[in-house]
Each structure stands twice: as structure tokens, then as C-alpha cells.
């Protein structure tokens, strides 16, 4: 049993960082915490590891209350964002460190370290010092040091964020396949939403005061509970327009407060929005639901066309980001990189209004869930 | 800069450094030749810059006198024991100040410790003599100087070790805790090795201070125990000052620090730059 339970956890310095957080991570679960930097993701890991003492609350691991245990008595292992490899020790000794701490027999240490090193493909490097290996190898050494310990909980703090794209992809694949991670509870912290969507069995979106939404990748991406979640999942980030809901000739419109842009509200949303009796809202539409209208293209369902002019076009290989001005509002759209748009070019943007979100202006709550 | 100017600067630089080296080394040269002159030649009004005859027997005169050998050994014992104590205690105190500043008294405590080196030592000469005389019954022993020199060396060691420990990444220690090491084991396995270069330079500075100290040694010891600095002026024969033996003895006393420095030079450079540049 290596279930991790957190109850009513509070931690703050001048201001609360984590406020009455409850979380349960099941054995074998890969739980990813994603959120902007400085929001307290690392603090959460440090609390679980015992490097920080909570102001209130309980941390239970495998049925045992570890809230007051010092870090060296907790069955947790953690990788640090900086890797924190011991510079004066070889890769072998770095990985062996948790085993040496338990004073295991020499032969067993040798066996277990080399098993882990082979698994992570660093068995050729064990004699080297951390200064003599590459970033990706350092990361794997740090991972090896945590794997070899066979803890009950794994805490991974931005383990692959600072590596180049190719190695990141390789290591991400490795996280999917590592058997060792399937026997313990894992908490993986990242600021990269794509990493979170790729790796997480469940995802917790870290916001002010703790986790603002917990759910599967599909849930947090497609059904964000708050504007904060919607804004931090997705690249490029969601278009947000401050709108007033007004009824014109029996049709409900979201009218942008700072421009002449007005978008009709799709039929399913009208009911959830109580016929429009909510006044002002934040209207959110992801760039992938805004496209450039091709010649001869027919509109479907709840699609709506607005006229705009291109202010910026960024081709990014497999897709392109197009930023346009429509009636005075700035809208980001995704387009194909094949057609190059010039600055100032007129375009017709197709907005799939059925995919829009409506957030409460004050609480940020999603009104159309 | 043109090729010619560049070479000119290089030449001027070597000329300047060469002159500087000559000026710096001349006293040692003169000490060396004086040490092997006969006393009659030393006392001549016109100095000679090359001995008429090298009196190698002067070496025998020095080493045949037990008190000379004893003085060197006593100094070695006092300086080494004092250095070991200062570095050990200074490391503990420095670690506390670096890692637990609030509990250890903070900046004020750190500054107070350093401020102990700021008063003129002679101000505490007599009180210290009285204090050690009362406690140990006599001051003419090794332990008095070993402890007394801590007054000067511990603030230095504490302050420098504090700086080195501050620069040692805390995360490495935290990683060690998570590996399962208790704070004490983590200190010895992970943190201490990070500061070894700094520690070596601290040790060297402490050792050289203790080896060279004269003021307190002159007051506290002299008969049972002697150190090289108070032995050096003692080469007399009646009213005759034996400059050649004094020069030779002090030249011998210069050798240990030089050897030590050469051995530890690698650490010294790294250690002293530790606090300046990270990485």
C-alpha cells in the first residue's frame, strides 16, 4: 500500500501558498501538478518530502501519518529541479547514495545500482563525475538515485523541463514505461501543460491557494472549471474577451465591451446561461476553434464568421499562429503554415461558438459546464 | 595594439616583475649568506655579499643545541593543535551561522565574532596573562598558547567557514536527507567535501598566524616551552649578538610555512576564490 493522502494541508509565509488542500494519490497513479511558476508547486513537494513543515494538516503515506517525520525517515524519494547531484561523487556513488544510507551490503549495492543504470542507459557512465556528463545524463542520474531507493512515493520536480526537445521526448516516453513508477504513488510537477496532458493519469492544476481543478487530461482541458485553468492549459493560450450578454431579435449575443465584436451564443449554452440573465461574462474561445475561412468553405452548425485584419503571422512547422484584429478586438487563431498571411491582410475568421466557454467575471467559474 | 607595442609591454612587464622579485627576495638572500658567515665577517663595518667562507658548521651549532630543536617542535605542536581546534570549532560555528542564522544569533552574532579580531591584541595581553596564570597555575605550557590563539584564529575560521558553507548548495544536503541520511551524516558525506578547499585555506591562515605569533608567546612562555619567534632573538654569547646563528635559525623557521603553502597552494587559490565566484 502506497497511497498518499493529504488532508487540510496549509502552508504559508507572509501569505498562504497552500490553503486547506485535500488530495489523494492512489498507488501506481501518476499525478501531475501543472501550473505557472511561483504558485507553490515545489512547496507542495517539499511538504510531502518533509523539507518544509506544514502549518496545519496531515500527510498520510501508506496508511502511516508522516506529517511530523523528518525527511530522512520518510519513505519518499524526490528529484530536484536542479538535479542536486553530489559533485564530488561519481555517477555510481550518486545513484548508490540511498543504499549507502541504509548501509546495505556491497554486492547488493553494486547489483541494484547497475540495474538502474542499465534501465536508464547510463551504465557506461557510472565512473564519471556529474560535471563530466550532459544535461540529459544528469537528469537520468538524478532519476536513478530516486528509483534505486524503492520508496513509497516519488516526487518529481520539473525533471525534464530544462532539457532540449529531443531528449525531453525520449525521457517522457521513459516515464510512461518505467515499471517502478507503477508500484508507488507519483507526484510530478511541471509548468508545461503538454507534459501534464501526456503523462498524467490525473492532473491537478495549481493555482492560488492550492489545486484549483483535479481531473483527467480530458477533463481539465475540455471542461475547465475556472478561467484560471482555461488560461493555463493550452498553447497558444485561450482568447478571453470581456463581454456583455444581450438579446437582439430573440438571439443571445456576447458583445465585447471594448470593441464592436459580437458573437452569437450557441444554443446549448443559452440554456445554461439562464437565457442570458448573467450580465457580464468572460468569453473564452481556444485558438484551435478559430480558423481562417478558405474560399468555398461552408459553415457548419454553430460556426460564425467575423472579418478581421492580420496583425501577426507565425508559422511554427506543423501549424501556424495567426493574430488578427476583428472589430477592434484581438483574436488568436490557428491556421495552416502553408498559406502565408501578410501583415494587414484581410481575413475572414470562422469562430466555432459551440466550443466557447463563459466564465463568471468575479469568481472565474465556468458557467457552461 | 601593434605587434611591436605588444612585445614592448611584455618586456617592460618582465623587467618590472624581475626587479620586484629581486627586491622581495634580497632579504632572504642576505639572511641566507649571513647564516653561513663566521661571526667576525658578520660584524665587519662593510657588509659582504658573498661569504669569504661558507661556515656549514653553523648548522651543527643550531641543531646541537637542544633548546633550538625543542623550540621548533614546540611551535609545530602549538600551531598544529591550535589550527586543528580552530578549524574544527570554526566549521561547526560557521555551519550553524550559515544554515541556521536565526537560531545562531544572526548577522549580529557573526559580526560580533569577527569583531574579536578588531581590537589591538596588546590590549588584552595582561588580562590574558592573569587569566591563564590563575587557571593553569602557570602559563609556561603548550595548552595556554593553544587555547589563547583561538581568540584570534577562531573568529577568522568561523567567519570564512560561514561564507564557504553559505555557498555550498543547500539542495545537496536536502537531497541527502531524502536519500536517508541524518543531518549529521549528510554533513560529513555531502556538505563537508564541498568546503574542503576553503577549509584548507583557513587551516593554512590559522597555522601561519600561530607559527609567527610573538607578542603573546613572549609573555606567556619561555622556559619550559619556547617557540621559534622567541628563540630567534636569543642567540647571544656574553655581550656578543650572534647574528649569523639568529639569521640561520629564522631561515630554518621559514621553511615549514613555505613547504605547507606549496603543498596546499592548489586548495588555497580555489578556497579563497570560493567566496568570490561561484561555480
Image (spheres, rainbow, N blue to C red):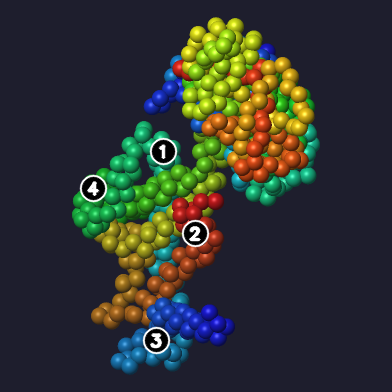
User: Could you classify mark 2 by the number of other residues whose Cα lies within 10 Å: few (under 14), some (14-19), or many (20 or more)?
Assistant: many
Q: Earlier in the sequence, mark 4 or mark 2?
A: 4
Q: CA distance from mark 4 to mark 1?
A: 29 Å
Q: CA distance from mark 4 to mark 2?
A: 35 Å
Disc 3 marks which residue? B38
Quadrant of the frame with the C terminus of chain A: top right
Q: Is residue A229 above or below residue B175?
A: above
The lab-note entry on whether marks 1 and 3 share a chain reads: yes
**Residue B131 - label:** 4
The lab-note entry on whether marks 3 and 4 share a chain reads: yes
Note whether residue A65 is visible: no
Disc 1 marks which residue? B96
Tag 4 subunit: B
Note whether residue A16 is visible: yes
Classify residue B141 as left or right of residue A68. Answer: left
Disc 2 marks which residue? B268
Position of residue B108 measured from the top left corner of the image (x, y, whole percent): 30, 41
The lab-note entry on whether marks 4 and 2 share a chain reads: yes
Q: Earlier in the sequence, mark 3 or mark 4?
A: 3
Q: Secondary structure at mark 2?
A: helix
Position of residue A202 measured from the top left corner of the image (x, y, whole percent): 66, 18
Foreground of the two, A295 or B147 = A295
Amino acid at each position: 500500500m502506497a497511497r498518499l493522502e493529504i488532508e487540510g494541508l496549509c502552508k504559508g509565509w507572509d501569505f498562504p501558498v497552500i490553503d486547506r488542500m485535500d488530495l489523494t494519490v492512489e498507488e501506481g497513479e501518476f499525478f501531475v501538478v501543472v501550473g505557472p511558476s511561483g504558485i507553490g508547486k515545489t512547496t507542495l513537494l517539499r511538504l510531502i518530502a518533509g523539507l518544509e513543515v506544514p502549518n496545519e494538516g496531515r500527510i498520510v503515506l501508506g496508511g502511516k501519518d508522516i506529517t511530523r517525520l523528518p525527511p530522512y525517515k520518510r519513505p519518499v524519494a524526490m528529484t530536484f529541479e536542479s538535479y542536486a547531484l553530489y559533485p564530488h561523487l561519481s555517477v555510481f556513488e550518486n545513484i548508490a547514495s540511498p543504499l549507502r544510507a541504509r548501509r546495505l551490503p556491497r554486492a547488493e549495492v553494486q547489483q541494484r545500482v547497475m540495474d538502474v543504470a542499465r534501465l536508464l542507459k547510463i551504465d557506461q557512465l557510472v565512473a564519471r563525475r556529474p560535471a563530466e556528463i550532459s544535461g540529459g545524463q544528469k537528469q537520468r542520474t538524478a532519476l536513478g538515485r530516486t528509483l534505486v531507493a524503492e520508496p513509497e512515493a516519488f516526487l518529481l520536480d520539473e525533471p525534464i523541463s530544462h532539457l532540449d526537445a529531443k531528449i525531453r521526448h525520449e525521457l517522457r516516453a521513459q516515464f510512461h514505461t518505467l515499471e517502478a513508477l507503477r508500484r508507488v504513488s507519483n507526484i510530478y510537477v511541471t509548468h508545461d501543460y503538454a507534459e501534464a496532458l501526456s503523462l498524467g493519469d490525473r492532473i491537478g492544476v495549481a493555482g492560488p491557494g492550492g489545486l484549483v481543478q483535479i481531473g483527467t487530461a480530458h477533463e481539465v482541458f475540455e471542461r475547465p472549471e475556472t478561467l484560471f485553468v482555461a488560461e493555463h492549459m493550452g498553447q497558444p493560450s485561450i482568447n478571453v474577451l470581456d463581454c456583455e450578454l444581450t438579446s437582439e431579435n430573440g438571439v443571445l449575443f456576447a458583445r465585447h465591451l471594448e470593441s464592436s465584436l459580437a458573437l452569437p451564443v450557441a444554443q446549448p449554452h443559452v440554456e445554461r446561461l439562464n437565457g442570458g440573465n448573467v450580465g457580464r461574462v468572460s468569453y473564452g474561445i481556444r485558438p484551435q476553434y478559430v480558423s481562417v475561412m478558405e474560399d468555398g468553405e461552408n459553415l457548419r452548425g454553430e460556426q460564425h464568421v467575423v472579418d478581421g485584419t492580420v496583425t501577426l503571422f507565425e508559422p511554427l512547422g506543423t501549424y501556424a499562429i495567426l493574430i488578427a484584429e476583428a472589430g477592434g478586438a484581438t483574436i488568436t487563431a490557428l491556421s495552416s503554415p502553408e498559406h502565408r498571411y501578410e501583415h494587414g491582410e484581410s481575413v475572414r475568421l470562422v469562430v466555432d461558438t459551440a466550443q466557447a466557454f463563459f466564465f463568471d467575471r468575479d469568481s472565474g467559474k465556468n458557467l457552461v459546464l | 595594439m601593434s605587434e611591436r607595442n605588444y612585445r614592448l609591454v611584455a618586456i617592460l612587464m618582465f623587467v618590472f616583475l624581475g626587479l620586484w622579485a629581486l627586491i622581495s627576495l634580497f632579504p632572504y638572500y642576505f639572511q641566507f649568506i649571513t647564516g653561513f658567515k663566521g661571526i667576525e665577517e658578520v660584524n665587519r663595518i662593510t657588509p659582504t655579499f658573498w661569504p669569504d667562507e661558507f661556515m656549514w658548521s653553523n648548522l651543527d651549532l643550531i641543531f646541537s643545541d637542544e633548546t633550538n630543536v625543542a623550540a621548533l617542535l614546540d611551535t609545530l605542536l602549538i600551531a598544529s593543535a591550535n589550527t586543528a581546534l580552530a578549524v574544527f570549532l570554526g566549521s561547526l560555528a560557521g555551519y550553524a551561522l550559515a544554515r541556521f542564522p536565526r537560531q545562531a544569533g544572526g548577522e549580529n552574532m557573526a559580526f560580533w565574532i569577527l569583531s574579536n579580531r578588531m581590537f589591538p591584541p596588546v590590549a588584552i595581553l595582561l588580562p590574558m596573562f592573569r587569566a591563564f596564570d590563575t587557571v593553569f597555575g602557570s602559563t609556561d605550557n603548550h595548552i595556554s598558547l593553544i587555547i589563547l590563539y583561538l581568540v584570534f584564529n577562531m573568529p577568522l575560521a568561523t567567519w570564512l567557514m560561514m561564507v564557504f558553507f553559505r555557498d555550498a548548495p543547500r539542495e545537496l544536503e536536502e537531497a541527502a536527507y531524502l536519500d536517508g541520511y541524518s543531518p549529521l551524516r549528510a554533513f560529513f558525506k555531502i556538505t563537508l567535501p564541498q568546503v574542503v578547499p576553503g577549509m584548507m585555506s583557513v587551516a593554512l591562515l590559522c597555522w601561519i598566524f600561530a607559527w609567527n605569533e610573538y607578542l603573546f608567546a613572549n609573555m606567556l612562555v619561555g622556559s619550559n616551552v619556547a617557540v621559534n619567534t622567541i628563540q630567534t632573538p636569543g642567540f647571544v654569547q656574553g655581550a656578543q649578538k650572534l647574528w649569523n646563528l639568529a639569521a640561520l635559525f629564522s631561515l630554518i623557521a621559514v621553511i615549514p610555512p613555505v613547504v605547507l603553502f606549496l603543498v596546499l597552494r592548489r586548495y588555497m587559490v580555489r578556497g579563497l576564490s570560493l567566496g568570490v565566484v561561484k561555480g
